[in-house]
Each structure stands twice: as C-alpha cells, then as structure tokens.
Amino acid sequence: MGRPIRIKALQTGSHGLTTNTLLALLLGLPILAGVAGIILPAFGYLPALGGLRFTLSHFAELAGQPHILRSSLTGLTTGLATTCAAVAITGTFVAGFAGMPAFSRIQHLVSPLLAVPHAAAAFALAFLVAPSGFLVRLVSPELTGFTRPPQWLIPNDPVGLSMVAGLITKEVPFLFLIALAALPQLPLRQSRQLTAALGYGRLSGFLISLWPALYRRIRLAVFAVLVYSVSVVDVAIILGPQLPATLPVRIAQWTADHDLGARFLASAAALLQLAVVLAAVVIWLLIERLGRFGLARLTYSGRRLRNDGVPRLVSAFVMAACAALIFLGIAILGVWSIAGLWPFPNALPAKLTSQTWLRTLPQLWPALQTTIALALTAAALALLSAILLLHRNGADRGGNGPRYRLLYLPLLLPEISFVFGLQILFVSGGIKPAFGSVLAVHFLFVLPYVLLSLSAPWRELDPRFERIAAGFGRSALQILLTVRLPLLFRACLTAFAVGFSVSVSLYLPTLLIGAGRLTTIATEAVALSSGGDRRVIGVYALVQASLPFLAFLIASLAPQLLFRNRRAMRT
Amino acid sequence: MQQIAKTRPLTLADVTIRLAERTLLAVSATVMPGEVLTIMGPSGSGKSALLAFAGGFLDPAFDASGRLLIGKVDVTDIPANRRHAGILFQDPLLFPHLSVGGNIVFAIPPSIKGHNARRALAGQALDEVGLAGFFDRDPETLSGGQKARVALQRVLVSAPHFLLLDEPFSKLDAALRQQMRELVFSRAKAAGLPAILVTHDSADAEAAGGRVIEIGGEEKA
C-alpha cells in the first residue's frame, strides 16, 4: 500500500507565489495606487502642491463648472450606446454566420482593424464623414448641389453619434476576436443541427442554445469595452462633442492646466468619472438582466423565428462596413498627406506634392523615435513577463478559468482616473516624467494583451515534445529554451507585435505620465486635431496606422527567413 | 556507469491508478533487461496513464499509488527529467526546428563532450538505420518510416534506463509496421533495456514476445 502521490511533471520552483499573486503585484498594486492617488487630492490633500487640509471645496468647484452634468451624461450615454451596438452587432453576426464560409471571409476583413490605433481610426472616419470629407465630395455637387461644405456639426455632433460610430469600428473587431477565441469551446455544430432540426432559425437557434455560454466567456471583454468607451479621451477629442466636451476630455484638459491648482479639480473630476463608470456598469447589469428575461421569454414561447435573413444580412453588412470605412479612411488620410491644392467639391486633389511630408518629417522624427523605443521595450518586457508567468504556472486550462481574470484589471478601470492618480503619485514622489515612468505605465496596458495573445498557443503546444525532452534529462529551463520557445517562435512574435501595437496606440497614459516632455505619435496626432491642418494630420495618422502593420508584417516574415529550411516551422 | 544503469530491471510495485475514485488499473510486475512487458487494453482503460506514471508526467487529475523501481532504486518521486525514460509515442515527434542530425545530437547525454564527438555519434546512429547522409535534412521532408527510425535512434542515443512505448506502430502502414516492430524490439533487446509497451493491437504483443497484461473490460471497485 503506497501513499497517494501527485506528480506534476516539469514543474519548477516553489508554489509560494501563484499566478494570481504575481499578476496582482504586477498589475493590481500600481492600479490601486493610482486610484488612491486621486482620492486624497480630490478631498484637498496633496502636500506637494500645498494642500494640507481636507475639504469638499473642490467638489463644489467641480459642481460649479459649466455643463458638468451634461459632460458626464454624454460620456455615459455614448459609452453605453457603443457597448450595446458592439454586443448586438458582434452577437448577431456570430449567431448568424459562425461555422459558415462567409464567417471566415469577414473574419479576415475585420481582424486587421484590431491593429489600427484608436486615434488613427477616428481620424480616418472624420476625414470620410466631415462636411468637407470624402463622402460628401464624392456626391457633390452632382447629387447634393453643394459647392461649399455644408454647415453640419459632423464630426463632433453634440449627441456624440460620430463618436459612437468611431468607437464601434474599433470595439466590434475586439469583441469579435474574443468571441472567436471562445467559440471552439462550444458545441457549435451539434447545437446548430439540433436547433435547425427543431425548426428554429439560425439566429434564434443560436441565441437559445449557445448565446448564454458564449456571453459568459466574453463578458469581461464586454465590460472592458464599456469602461473604455465611457472613459475614452483620444477618440472623444477627434470625433466627440465639443462645448461641452465629455467629462474625460475635460479632465484631461484640467490635468494639463498650467495652474497646478487645477490638479485638485481634476482629481475631484476623476473621482466623478469613476462614479460615472460605476453607474454605467450598474446600468449594463440591468441591461443584461433585461436580455436574460427577453431570452427566457423567447425560449419558452417556442417561436421559431425562421425569417431572420434581414438582421443577419445587416450584421454582416455592418461588420464589412466597419472594415471598409476605416481602410478607405486611411487611404484618404494618405491622399491628404500628399495633396496639393484640393478645392472643395473635387473628389481627388488637383495636384500631388511631397511638400507636406518633407515639411513634417523633421518635427515628427523625435516623436517617432520615442514611439518606437517605447513600443519595442514595452512589448519586449511584456513578452518576457508573459513567458515567465506561463512557464511558472502553465497556460490557463479551460481558457476561462478564474486564473487570469486579474489580467483585465487595467481594462476595467477608467484610464483617466487611475493613470492620473499615478501621475500625482509620481509628482508627489518627485519622479520627473521620463522614459522609464512612461514605459512602466505602458507595460501595465501592454501585458494583458500580450498574455492573452500568447496563452492560447502556449496551451495548444503538443505536451509530448517536452516529455520526450524531459526523458533525455533536460532541465525545465533547457526545455523552455531549446524546445518550447523555438516551437512557439511565431506565436511569440505575434504576441510581441500585439504588444507593440497596443503601445503605439496608447494616448492618455503617454500624455499624463509624459506630461508633455515625452511625446509620441499618438499624443502629437491628437494634439493636432484641433488645429485642423488635414495634410499634417494625414501624415501623423498614416504613420501611426502603419507602425502596427509593419510589426505584424515582420512577425509573419521573420519565421520564413529564420526557418527557411524547416518546412513545419514556416506555417 | 551507463552500462550498469541500463541493465537493471524495472519494477512496478503495486501500481494503482484511479480517476475520480474509479480504479483504472492495478499492476505489479518486474520487467527484466531486454524484456518487453505488454499492457493491452481498449482506449480509455488507463494504459496511457500507466506510461505517464512511469515517465513522471501523469496528469494531476489522476490518483496514483505504488512505487516504480529501477533495480533497487525507488524513482517514484524523481522528476521526469532525472528518470532517464526513453519514450516512443504514436507520432515520431521529431523537433521541427532542428535538423535530423540536430534531433539526435539533442538527445545525446551531456557526458559525451565535444561538438565533433557528439556529431559523429549522431551520424553513426543515422548510419545504423540506413539514413547515412541525412544529418542536415529537414525532418519534415522525411517519409513516415524514416521519421520513425530517426525517433527510435534518438531515444536510444539518450542512454535511457528503460523504454516506454505508447502504441508506437499504430500509425504506420501494414508493411512498415512489421518492419518497425522487428527493429524496435531487436534494438531494445540488444541494448538490454527493460520496456513497457501499451497497445490495443494483439499483433504488437505477439511481436514483442514477452508477458502480456490485459486491462480494462471489467470494472474494478
């Protein structure tokens, strides 16, 4: 009779630190510190700026700001509208098309959108839909009779519709790819066959049999979309309402105020933004409840809803339109950057010139260098951390266990609140804005995406390769370096490119922590938006949009070159 | 040292493997050097779990009790990478990022030092199975039979203390299968290695020529 034993092969190190504790240290501490960093100043306590007494006067000052309620509400409603639309579009499309040939075609069209930075996508949309934008020019003056741009408030309409549209083009691909990763865990084919045999339409069949399980798996991502859209700054500056702008935009303006006293006001406002996000989450929970109720009604009614062709086609059309709009918009950005004279109703410029590029490049160069240096180091550090975390603890087995939920922490709190708190902490601690501090904050946002990207291939690698190597007496570290990492070379490069793209698109963290001393393409491009020189904006936005594509291009070409004599490594 | 280590018997002492309170199998046996013990059973009977137990990589979902001995040394709690288990799976699993020769060099114990010596040994191992001149080839360009032979030589050069064979012939076509059976069993015998073969093919058991333990079929409490 032997005692029961449990053997974990290739496990190294002690079990003192679990993944969760490690992640909590890496991500949780700075974020909680950031939130704490706004609470004290909001109540007047910030010794570095001479605030030594607790007071509510900053909230009174905040309440006295013109249109503060309206600013808070537009942020809230645009965020909720974006999330509702993104979930509805993604859900309808997945329900209508998963497992069909059209699905993978649209998937290929939509996936690259994820790499387009938010600011570049917003500019692309703005250049299309503005009164003097490409779409109006295309039909003017023939259809519209316009010989000069109409006086529409688009983009920057007061209700925030163009902002919602801009956010949807980015959030739909994000939710779609998360749903795509969750789909293989669901019994798609069997459920489809079963519900079809019972006479259900494709949409209703999917909704009844699979949607609850799918939604549970993408729920955290949905909340990330909600929090992001309610608190977004860069897209709101480019496409959102002005006078009053949304609350996050106004907070960003106050944090940049030359009067350092405005930091107290901004802290109070950041706390208000936290409350707005909380309200959005509560409202979303109610919407979820309504959805569950509606789905239950549908289920028990037994209605088959076989004629669902229209909603299915609409969802496919919107998915394709997201991609078409952004890529057309990016092309227009490119045209603007080389446009000479381009009078209004003309669809294309009368003359092309390299003047704008030649004039802009010298001033763009330092920001580009900073952008690339930040993105490379942040992505490299995040990839290294992700490899260490996965090596210590193995990939999350079910793909959805509670293990890596903490990953979403930086995505579930409003950037404007906790990053601003970090800025205050840095200032209080006498830390000058520098490459290192901006890098640290980039790392917080890059790591979750890199870990998400790497954990699926990590989990899927055939474990027998490592068992064979262990049989040869190789240590866990040797196996990692000589077997696992070479076999996952392509996946590591892809994760690196994902991290690089995230860093390139980070606007607010760079703005707040860099405090104007460290500028990147993202901060420069958004800063240009108020000036309205479309040619220069075209250059910046095009450079920003092409950086991620370059990263992904290199990630897909490098294995071809390095392993050109190893057929199995190239695909 | 290696030679002495190789020729010790392998003992499964009262090995019982359970999954969720259900006993999958219970085995007690000593496998002499050069002998092949065959474990026969349908899929899901836990025979692969037995190999995983012996190799040191049993999934923690299983509960295992009993001891594994090499000679008189209890290796039950020794981690996989210090057990010197030579494993052949259904697939050859050549490392796709290394050359054919690189796969073999990778397996040679570190005690054999010097780039040239290791390379020469690998070349010799390829030579033995009719693959001379294949050193720099991409494993992906080899035929199924060639891959299987490289996988066998890779295990043998690693100087294992015992062999674990996890249905290594099941994916080969009929003609090749008979050939590989003869090659594997004769070389295991020549190296004086105790081996455990799990399979559901009685022809494998026949070719192995050793004792056969059948498992599964009946439920044990």
Image (spheres, helix red, strand yellow):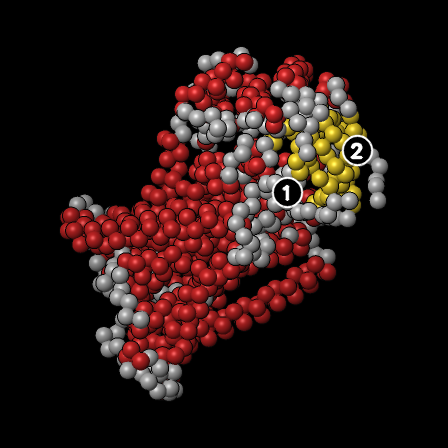
Q: For the residues carrying marks 1 and 2, which lies nearer the camera in this image?
A: 1
Q: What SS does tag 2 mark? A: loop
Q: Nearer the viewer, residue A556 or B99?
A: B99
Q: On the rendered image, what quadrant is the C terminus of chain B found in?
A: top right
Residue drawn at x 38%, y 83% as measured from the top left: A43
Q: Nearer the viewer, residue A304 or A223?
A: A223
Q: Amino acid at mark 1?
A: Asp
Residue A272 in the image, given as x and y percentages of width and height: 42, 77
Residue B62 placement: quadrant: top right
Q: Earlier in the sequence, mark 1 or mark 2?
A: 1
Give the distance between the C-alpha atoms of the residues marked 1 and 2, in whole angstroms.
25 Å
Q: Amino acid at mark 2?
A: Ile
Residue A353 in the image, given as x and y percentages of width and height: 17, 45
In the displayed structure image, the side of residue A516 where residue A568 appears, left or right:
right
The image shows residue B71, relative to residue A552, as above or below, that is above
Labelled disc at residue A320: none
Q: What SS does tag 1 mark? A: loop
In the displayed structure image, the side of residue A286 where residue A477 appears, left or right:
left
The image shows residue A16, relative to residue A418, as above or below, that is above
Q: Residues within 10 Å of mark 2 (few under 14, many from 20)?
A: some
In the rendered image, which residue does mark 1 sit on?
A: B77
Q: On the rendered image, what quadrant is the N terminus of chain B found in?
A: top right
The image shows residue A85, relative to residue A320, as above or below, that is below
Residue drawn at x 39%, y 37% as measured from the top left: A556
In the rendered image, which residue does mark 2 sit on?
A: B215
Total number of numbered labels? 2
